[in-house]
Amino acid sequence: MIITIYSDASTLKDYKNRSGIGLVVTMFGEVYKTVGMYVGPLNNTNAELLGILLALKEAREIDEVDDVHLVRICCDCIPAIDLACGDSQVSVHNIEGSRILEKIDELVFALSCPVEYQWVKAHNGNEYNEMADELAYEHANFPA
């Protein structure tokens, strides 16, 4: 089975960097689960990285009970993808981002299958990416 998770973050710079995350977990081409949450004040890259981290946590939960062959994380933030997969020429210049990256690495190694990162163009009509974006924006604007 292949798990594809669309991850997005929304950071409101005019409101002290309030950030929300949205995830859409899909299996067999159908929505399995959606997750949205307020994650506090973060810069945009760290919010996107935290979204990737939470996507991997969701994948790990599924991997513990099902036979997963591949986890694909789809994200519209190239810097976050580059950092998560270790291909970035840019380093994280803050402790929070470094900690998130360490946790991403731990989860990738804990999975029984490979992880693939895929960039998707933002606001381009991709149904699941749009759903993740809406969840992230909603939770950034209306924290619980």
Image (tube, rainbow, N blue to C red):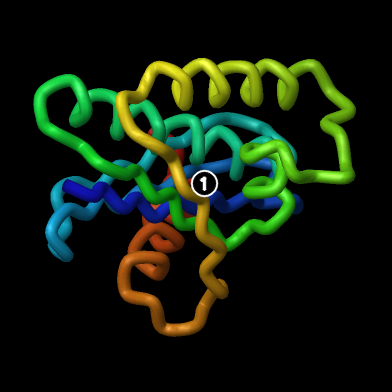
Question: Looking at the rendering, which quadrant does residue 16 occupy?
Answer: top right
Q: Can residue 141 be seen?
A: no
Residue furthest to the bottom: 125
Residue located beneath label 1 in the image: 140
Marks counted in the figure total 1
Position of the C terminus by quadrant: top left
Instruction: Identify residue type, mark 1.
Output: Ala
Q: How crowded is mark 1: few (under 14 residues within 10 Å), some or many (20 or more)?
A: many
Res 90 quadrant in image: top right
Q: Which residue is drawn at 14% across and 49% down?
A: 32
> x%, y% of residue 122?
55, 72
Q: Give the residue displayed 10% in from the left and 23% down from the top.
A: 65
| Residue 67 appears left or right of 130 | left
The foreground one among 47 and 79 is 79
Q: Which of 65 and 6 is in front in this view?
A: 65
Q: Where is residue 76 in the image (x, y as percent from the top left)?
A: 57, 62
Q: Residue at x 58, y 41 (%)?
A: 19
Q: In the image, is residue 95 above or below residue 50?
A: above
Judge from the rendering whether residue 136 lies leftward or rightward of residue 16; answer left or right: left
Tell me the residue at 52%/31% (across/down).
39
The x and y percentages for residue 125 are: 41, 83
Is residue 121 in sight in this rendering?
yes
**Of residues 3 and 35, the one drawn nearer to the viewer in this rendering:** 3
In this view, the residue in front, 11 or 77, is 77
The image shows residue 44 at horizontal and vertical percentages of 70, 46
> Left of 34 or right of it: where is 141?
right
Query: Where is 96 relative to 8, above or below?
Result: above
**Mark 1 secondary-structure assignment:** helix
